[in-house]
Image: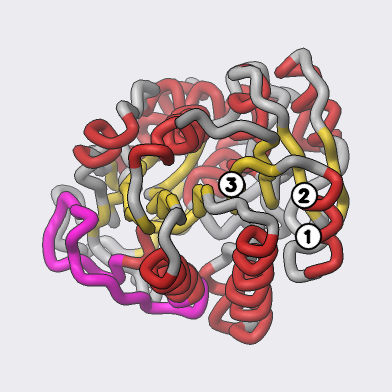
Amino acid sequence: MHITGSILVTGGAGFIGSHTVVELLAAGREVVVLDNFCNAKPSVLPRIRTLAGRDFTFQEGDVCDKGTLESVFRKHDIGAVIHFAGLKAVGESTRLPLDYYRNNLSGTIGLLETMQAFGCRNLVFSSSATVYGDPAEVPIRESFPLSATNPYGRSKLMVEDLCRDLAASEAGWRIALLRYFNPVGAHPSGLLGEDPQGIPNNLMPYLLQVAAGQRPFLEVFGQDYPTPDGSGVRDYLHVVDLAKGHLAALGALHGLQGAVPINLGTGKGYSVLEMIQALERTVGHPIPWRFGPRRPGDIAQCYADPTRAQELLGWRAVLDLDCMCRDGWNWQQSGAVAQI
């Protein structure tokens, strides 16, 4: 059963959302983007059109506004939803837990209620590897115990529980719970990439800013983890591979029953020091860094077992670390960041 109708992409102007919209348009899908620009900028929209060579419908609005959601569903024949909209900074979530629960939980409840009212039962949800907490072992499989160490992670886990409960209560729901590992890189064109507001929370955008001379050095949090070089190990995934994972999930929804968790990662972990060395190879000069203390809540290592994604979606990551560094640096250097 092929999904007909338009694909609603909430948060479609954001980092992962914008790359996914490009892939959807390239695949010939009709797309409706809903975004309130709380973590994105309007100048992303013409760039998506340039890259795709096609237009799409844009609705400015908040996923927490039920009236806006109902208006979108009334105006458009929505066949499936890819749900990115939500707040996503771990540190901020510990300071502003109510904001995170209001946006990430209430927004999703309103979306699911609207989907239910309009007879749309197909959902691809942007979850996170944070739902595994501090895993007892790696690589991480979908069957591992779930927990969370901060309000952001708990909000993702609660939405997963919501989806599982909804699917158990009513037949016909097909929900892919995509648990991302660490998205990095940028579109190879240099037109789309990550543009974090203020001080970046994640390693790669911070490292790129240090490499570009915008920040004095990178502080590596912790040098005594039980890893090969003492620094934390993560599964870094090119954002274009991740976007294609959403396209694959959309195509596989008809074969899913209920709410199914699926890891999206490469299956390989890189340490912070390995990431510094890889980017140094790309930029051709040393990047200043120094060790600092561990950050509370950080874990030693986290990388995926991506077997289920290959089995259920026919998807696997193909872009390597050199591509991630090259495309990220290209974006950083392109001047596009300043124009966004």
In the image, taking residue 154 as reference, residue 139 lies left or right, namely left
Q: Nearer the viewer, residue 273 or 217?
A: 273
Which element carries disc 1, helix, strand or loop? helix
User: Is residue 149 shown in magenta?
Assistant: yes
- The secondary structure that most of the magenta stretch takes on is loop
Q: Residues within 10 Å of mark 2 (few under 14, many from 20)?
A: many
Q: Which mark is residue 69?
A: 1
Check the image and report above or below for 46 versus 258: above
Query: Three-letter amino acid code at disc 1?
Result: Leu
Residue 31 against residue 154 in the figure, above or below: above
Which of discs 3 and 1 lies nearer the camera? The answer is 1
Residue 119, given in percent of the width and then of the height, sits at 62, 54
C-alpha separation, residue under disc 1 versus residue under disc 2: 9 Å
Residue drawn where x is 25% and y is 49% of the image:
303
Q: What is the quadrant of the C terminus in the image?
A: top right
Would you call the spot at circle 3 few (<14 residues within 10 Å), some (14-19), or many (20 or more)? many
Q: Are marks 3 and 2 in contact (CB under 8 Å)?
A: no
Instruction: Specify start and end residues of the magenta stretch as a single range.
Output: 132-154
Disc 2 marks which amino acid?
A: Leu
Total count of labels: 3
Q: Earlier in the sequence, mark 3 or mark 1?
A: 1
Q: Nearer the viewer, residue 134 or 52?
A: 52
| Mark 1 Cα-neighbour bin, 10 Å: few <14, some 14–19, many ≥20 | many
Residue 3 visible, this angle? yes
Q: Which residue is mark 2?
A: 34
The residue located at (51%, 24%) in the rendering is: 283
| Residue named by callout 3 | 82
- Please give the name of the residue rendered at 61% of the width and 47% of the height, measured from the top-left corner: 81
State which mark lies toward you, 1 or 2: 1
Q: Considering the numbered disc 2 on the image, is that residue within a helix, a strand or a loop?
A: strand
